[in-house]
Amino acid sequence: MSCEKSVYITTPIYYVNDIAHIGHAYTTIIADSISRYSRLIGHDTFFLTGTDEHGQKIEESAKAKGKSPKEYADAISATFKNLWDDFEISYDAFIRTTDEKHKIGAQKAFEVMAQKGDIYKDVYSGHYCISCETFFTKNQLLEEEFCPECGKTTTVVEEESYFFRLSKYQDKLLEWYEQNPSCILPKSKRNEVIRFVESGLEDLSITRTSFDWGVKIPESFNDPKHVMYVWLDALMNYLTALGYGSDEVNMRYWPARVHLIGKDILRFHAIYWPAFLMSLDQPLPKHIAAHGWWTRDGQKMSKSKGNVVNPKEVADAYGLENFRYFMLREVPFGGDGDFSQKALIDRINSDLGNDLGNLLNRLIGMSGKYFEGTIDSKDIVLYYKDELAQVEESIDKLEPLLFEMQIHRYLEELWRPLSIANKAIDKHQPWVLMKEGKTDEAMALVALIANILARVSVMLHPVMPETTRKIATALGFEIDNSSWTQLIIEKSMLASFTITQIPPLFPRIEEVKLEQAEETPKEEKKEASSKEEGIALIGIDDFFKTSIKIGTIIEAQEIEKSDRLLLLKVDIGEASPRQVVAGIKEFYSPQDLPGTQICLVANLKPAKLMGNKSEGMILAAKDKNGLSLIRPEAPKSNGTTVG
Ligand code: ME8
């Protein structure tokens, strides 16, 4: 097939505040598999991944590590790139938002949007979650303070800002969703987005002035204190990677065939991004495909929860391609999946070992024993027309499943021909055929099995490139665009060919002890979920990351307009007291607190609450009878460590 089509496939660009875990690997492996399929069928394919390096979150993470944001971003970005190289991810470009070319493109977009009349200056006043890099209105917050996405404390922001006229695009967006039923996949997610947009879009603050680790807005605005909102900067990567805003434009790949993302960032991709593109007069992507979360013991994986599974460790222990197969097969696209080594081992031993590996072993055995490895396909249709028709029916269903991101169903359907092959051997018993002198029929059966394995390995190639190459070698052919055309499109048979022995592909696997992915024993798991309401168990090292100190409240006062918060000064034995904002006003009067000893979490990142800096968190317990501060049983010196 000729390269008449240009196809563009992207992953999110990953924040450099954390190293990669299996959630990141999942998105990247799906994108890699689709890109490999697209290349196999002859499409001119461009696969983009990279890292998202600006914003307040990264600036703060760098500061906490005593590094400059760029030094910090360089180091973590390299860990992503190295991991993808280790995993042989077939990306065509790895973009970093600190790349000069990207910054120029993002600034160009800002200018174009402004020329279009879509940008204006005003004052932003509201709440911001640094962890999610997202603005929220007061109504969206949990208990008027906490981020509805991640539960962390939000910061009150009031600053001069440029705004994007998102509201102007509300109707056009609704029209786009309406006219393109598969623009958001899975389709259930599209309905969620439509409901959100129908409820009304507010204009979007797209610059910040309170920090400067970001892309400066264009000089023509003569307003150097403004840096772009990290999501505008980040989303633009999909265009700047193709040279948008520079002289080397490679826009033949635009619009993207698919932006693969996790469901946590659907709103940015399905609302903001198409609106930005409309403002830039660019065509809109064909699909935005949002997958679910990988969880561990039911909790979303994240480093701060200490429940991450390291993809490199899993791949080293169980085989990279086995891991790829498992991830794509185990969870329906769009749904959440709990990572378990048991499920991984079952998939390897059962689907790969029994269904695929044993079939190949049986084929090698039969062809060697009865025909010295030399096989001819000429009589397959004569003897096994029905089996062949069923196989073809399954194979024909595959491509649309892949392009509609039904990857688990793609693999499920791909296993049907293997089952047909295994059943055909059991039913027709080649050893009996040989005994009865029906050599042609036995030859046709062996050839049928070989041809089924050939077709399955071609279609499995994008997911398991190396393994399928080995199968093809055993069958005497190579997997490439021409064998795909012959075997899958033209439905030709391998002609006369020789089968050779190869070492077993899937030796039986037992559980390997992983450092980070240790399974929680079932009993403990139950206890954890009943006693701790599903909070993941942590090791003692994790506990000691929290520094809890005894302190004495030396001052307490009300905070204007707040029904919940008090402003405290707490002496924890340091040169100056800590200022702490505590949500205890309903239970304690400020005049009763001075002199009270408390326990303070002393190594939290400072946060701003109702405009007041808070440098720690006071421990308290709340039940239906009210709230009590946690205090030492007998007085202790300020600064004494709790633990
Ligand atoms: O959001 N399960 O970056 P990010 C499955 N920089 N997938 C997961 C996951 C989990 N537990 N955790 C993360 C950002 N992911 C932005 C994106 S794009 C213009 C900017 C995957 O490092 C998932 O795809 O937080 C998620 O959307 C992506 O990692 C976000 O990674």
Image: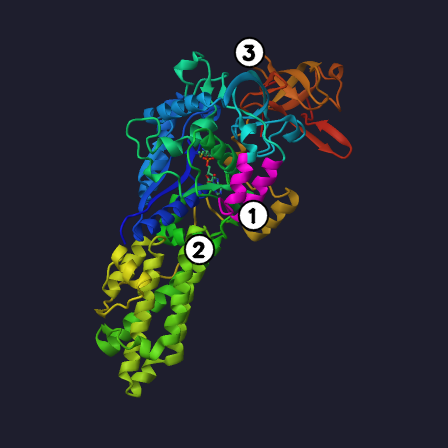
Q: Is residue 636 visible?
A: no
Q: Is residue 272 above or below residue 488?
A: above
> Looking at this view, is 585 or 108 the one in front?
108
Mark 3 or mark 1: which is in front? 1
Q: Is mark 2 within 8 Å of ligand 1?
A: no
Label 3 residue SS: loop
Return the disc, 3 or 1, that comes first in the chain's sequence: 1
Query: Where is residue 159 shown, x and y percent of the image?
Result: 55, 16
What numbered label is drawn on residue 119? Answer: none
Q: Is residue 337 visible?
A: yes
Quadrant in the picture for the N terminus: bottom left
Name the residue that disc number 1 marks. Answer: 188
Say whether residue 238 is left or right of residue 590.
left
Mark 3 or mark 2: which is in front? 2
Query: Which amino acid, by three-letter code, is at mark 1?
Result: Ser
Cβ atoms under marks 3 and 1 closer than 8 Å:
no
Magenta segment range?
A: 172-198
Mark 1 crowd level (few <14, some 14–19, many ≥20, 10 Å Cα)? few
Q: Residue at x 33, y 24 (%)?
A: 100
Name the residue that disc number 3 marks. Answer: 575
Mark 2 crowd level (few <14, some 14–19, many ≥20, 10 Å Cα)? some
Return the disc, 2 or 1, that comes first in the chain's sequence: 1
Return the disc, 3 or 2, that comes first in the chain's sequence: 2
Q: Residue at x 58, y 40 (%)?
A: 194
Task: Please say whether residue 306 is one of the residues in the magenta stretch.
Answer: no
Q: Is residue 641 above or below residue 516?
A: above
Cβ atoms under marks 3 and 2 closer than 8 Å:
no
Task: Please say whether residue 185 is one of the residues in the magenta stretch.
Answer: yes
> Looking at this view, is 505 or 595 the one in front?
505
